[in-house]
Amino acid sequence: APRAGRDAARLRCSGAQTLRLAARNHELQLEKPISKSISGRLLGNLLLENCGQGRKRVRDAHGGACSSSSFLFSRPRVSFAPPLRSAQGAALIQLLQEEQRKLSVQRGGQQPPVPVRHASFLEHDSEAPDHQHVPNGVWVIVGLLNFIAYTLDGVDGKQARRTNSSTPLGELFDHGLDSWACVYFVVTVYSTFGRGSTGVSVFVLYLLLWVVLFSFILSHWEKYNTGILFLPWGYDISQVTISIVYIVTAIVGVEAWYAPFLFNFLYRDLFTTMIIACALTVTLPMSLYNFYKAYKNNTLKHHSVYEIMLPLVSPVLLFVLCTTWIFVSPMDILEVHPRLFYFMVGTAFANISCQLIVCQMSSTRCQPLNWMLLPIALVLSVVVSGFAPNSETLLLYLLTAFLTLAHIHYGVVVVSQLSRHFNIRPFSLKKPTPD
């Protein structure tokens, strides 16, 4: 195991690069400043920022010479604590612990404000030595299944009309599941591009998730007010593009998306631009134009501004609550559990969308507040108050599980009630026999 007095601790990073840490005379030396792996970049940038290419001494608040690691430990925002998984990561932590103990002796026993265990985030990434990328075969399967699902999603309505079996239940099934599927599209793209310096940050991806969700609910807001559901081409373009990205990833590997392709323009920038451009140039203008036509023709179903904007109240409140949680989270919850947080947001949004779909099909008034906002607000209040500072992850898991089970229960109950009302079976063209 490496110790502070030895010459170096060699830690392997992805891309066959090696990050050398030398701890001699309270000094950390960086042989290669930035590795290709996320952990290497984080550590490299941190050391370069704090100790000037890893060789410059810094001075602490007492005016004496201190190690670069002392500055590392005193950084207030280094607060990630996923578990270690590799021997190299454990060796790094042991090296930093030795430096921390020496720093503690220099300061007369006073411990640095940030514990050493928080440095364990260095090994929690997709390119850590003990982790492998998603197998290429998985990308092929995902690409084919996504294209098949998109194709079936487009022909189900034609099949229902051909068999004379069109009912509101089919529309609820179709668009209700689509509303939940939005989050999976974003999360799988996150697995493709990653979160490194050439990837998409978790907060940017969170905002992109909301762009997708907003684009989805905008079409149903339009039908709620006009009675006509217009589906723009943006959805079709995105589905075909995502399927192609999955297949290409299986051929060239995820590393191909990390390199710039034109004038240092990264693929993640192209991905971000396409999502935002589709929303701003296709989805939003078409919805507003169709709304304007209904207004000019005096065919709007609602005439007051309050009633018109009512379906958007719950989505906006959901965005405010979840975004507030991200900014006030003591443990930076979005950085630690991005996929789980996305899934929680997507599940709550899917329930809001399904209730809006039911209202527009039945020509009933949309409720201003969805009940799922209440448990989210309660968890947020616990996080903000600091009542359970070490239980934020547990709260997120419990909240996500509760919302998921509640949404599934809602779907089963609504489908059962509609099936009985229309005297049909959910997954069969045969009529149920009377008892």
Image: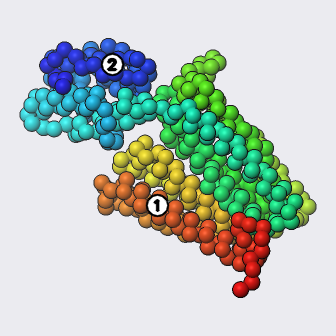
The x, y position of residue 347, in whole percent, is 56, 58
Quarter-wise, where is residue 336 in the image?
top left
Residue lying furthest bottom in this view? 435
Look at 65% across and 38% down and name the residue there: 143
The image's mark for residue 19 is: 2
Look at the image and tell me whether residue 36 can be seen: yes
Taking the spot 64% from the left edge, 29% from the top edge, the residue there is 248
Residue 373: where, in percent of width, then height?
Answer: 52, 64
Q: Is residue 138 left or right of residue 286?
A: left
| Image disc number at residue 401 | 1
Q: Which residue is nearer to you in this view: 351 or 178?
A: 178
Of the image marks 2 and 1, the number of the one nearer the N terminus? 2
Three-letter amino acid code of the residue under disc 1: Ala
Q: Looking at the image, which residue is at 40% across and 20% down?
A: 35
Closer to the camera in the image, 168 or 100: 168
Q: Position of residue 305 (x, y in %)?
A: 73, 64
Q: Quadrant of the C terminus?
A: bottom right
Residue 206 point in image, percent of width and height: 54, 45
Residue type at mark 2: give it: Leu
| Mark 1: few/some/many CA within 10 Å (<14, 14-19, 20+) | some
For mark 2, give the secondary structure. Answer: strand
Local SS, label 1: helix
| Res 200 visible | no
Q: CA distance from mark 2 to mark 1?
A: 40 Å
Using residue 407 as the reference point, say whether residue 149 is left or right of it.
right
